[in-house]
Image (cartoon, grey):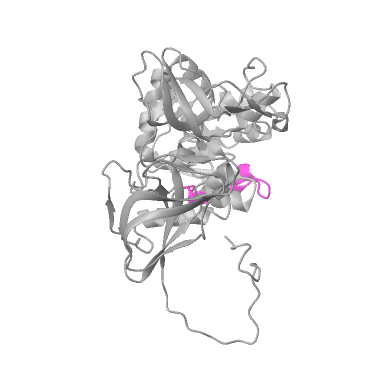
Amino acid sequence: MKVMLARAWGDPSTLEYADAPTPRPNAGEVVIEVRAIGCNFPDILIVQGEYQYKPELPFSPGCEVSGIVRGIGAGVTEVGLGERVFATMAWGGYAGVVAVDQRHVYALPDFMTFEEGAVFGLAYQTAWCGLVHRAGLRRGETLLVHAAAGGTGLAAVQLGRALGARVIATAGSAAKLEVARANGADVCIDYRTEAWVERVTRETHGEGANVIFDPVGGDVFEGSTRCIAFEGRLLVVGFAGGRIADVAGNRVLLKNISVVGVHWGLYRQRDATRVRRWMVELLKLRGGPSADAGHLEVVPAGARGAGARRHRRARELRQGRADPVIKLPLTRLDPSIELPSYAREGDAGLDLRAAHDATLEPGGRGLVGTGLAVAIPPGYAGLVLPRSGLALSQGVTVLNAPGLVDAGYRGELKVLLVNHGDKPVPVRRGDRIAQLVIQRVERAELIEVNELPASERGAGGFGSTGV
């Protein structure tokens, strides 16, 4: 198998793409074929040798993954072979296959993708550990979240909102604040252009924030001690700013505040049972696509910018404040086949997965069925798009994409794949092979012009789609 290996302390750019033996499960361990890997700030620190612990060199970083169970050791009862799972680790996640103690492996719900599972553990567990276990955040209190568009910060914004708090978010740009606002922040402050301590004081009518979630440290920590409420709880989550601040003991005394450490990894190490209970509660809040205002929504890093509008629209759809979705009649030709789902909230493309195993020879093509028969509604058409990741990982694309499923079509959805590589590519049942987008078909009014308007696409139709 392949791994990203650190042979010496240094920056992530020094990691080596190397071969390593595929692990076998010891007693109590689960072997996972990795489908997605979570990348976190601690990964950088551990590679630099600046984290709380230092693995023995060489090692692979990475503390959370998702994938499919391919092996189980003696005594494993939490998950079974072939099951979709996600897991947390101390390190070792940047690999094609990992072996993890079953205490830290969780079944991946049907309503979550591999990508969501791979980033759900660390961020949301840290937020729960801090806000619920350590700070005891109560409904109606004011929560101040720093670095609110980052992984743990965004999780804290969502969780704080779900718990009924009024959330104030700080971040360093308008785009980041838009992400925080789209995910439930009531007040957004750009700390680079505003006097954020004074603004927090004004927004709380001079009282200050009851709970402050601080993954930054340094000057941000010091400023937080000046805008915290009486009996406030200041959570020390990390030092992303690069400086560890000193605690002003007089401020702790004068306001009776609590400075509280949040080292979630130590709970994982010392009390895995407690951490599993936290995960159960978090998954209840994550819920399915129809969850209510208490919903936790995993936002991929690529959507933390202009894409935040897409996630806000998805929330409006769930709450009935936007156009209704298209109703697509569908039949499973095999009852064991999973219903298609969206890779991310707000996406327009439904995942299409292979209903059977197939092998694509070099330069060859194959028609792969999905086991799903659909009836495209009148006035709509289906577009089959190559968004499965196969092109990047295996050199496999959808032939003549986008494939068109005409309005009024009745029958099984099948995807014609072509292998552009020089090695056979196996496609396994359940592999994502494409996405289906349903689009309204509109009549066009032809307007004859002397010169066509400018476009970012080339004359042959290829190039940027502007998406």
Quadrant of the image containing the C terminus: bottom right
Residue 184 lies in magenta, yes or no?
yes
Q: Tell me the residue at 42%/79% (across/down).
A: 443
Q: Position of residue 314 (x, y in %)?
A: 42, 54
- Residue 242, placed above or below residue 169: above
Q: Is residue 169 left or right of residue 450?
A: left
Q: Position of residue 155 (x, y in %)?
A: 49, 38
Residue drawn at 31 percent across, 55 percent down: 373
In the rendered structure, the answer to whether residue 322 lies left or right of residue 463 reads left
Q: Can I make out residue 201 in this image?
A: no
Of the 4 image quadrants, the one containing the N terminus is top right
Q: Is residue 341 left or right of residue 51?
A: left
Q: Which residues are magenta?
A: 181-201
**Residue 230 showing in the rendered view:** yes
Is 182 in front, or is 425?
425
The image quarter in which residue 247 lies: top right
Above/below status of 113 relative to 410:
above
Tell me how many marks there are: 0
Q: Compare residues 306 and 405 and report the one nearer the observer.
A: 405
As drawn, 26 above or below 356: above
Q: Nearer the viewer, residue 62 or 81?
A: 81
Q: Is residue 422 magenta?
A: no
- Residue 79 location, x and y as percent? 36, 25
Percent x, y for residue 260?
53, 24
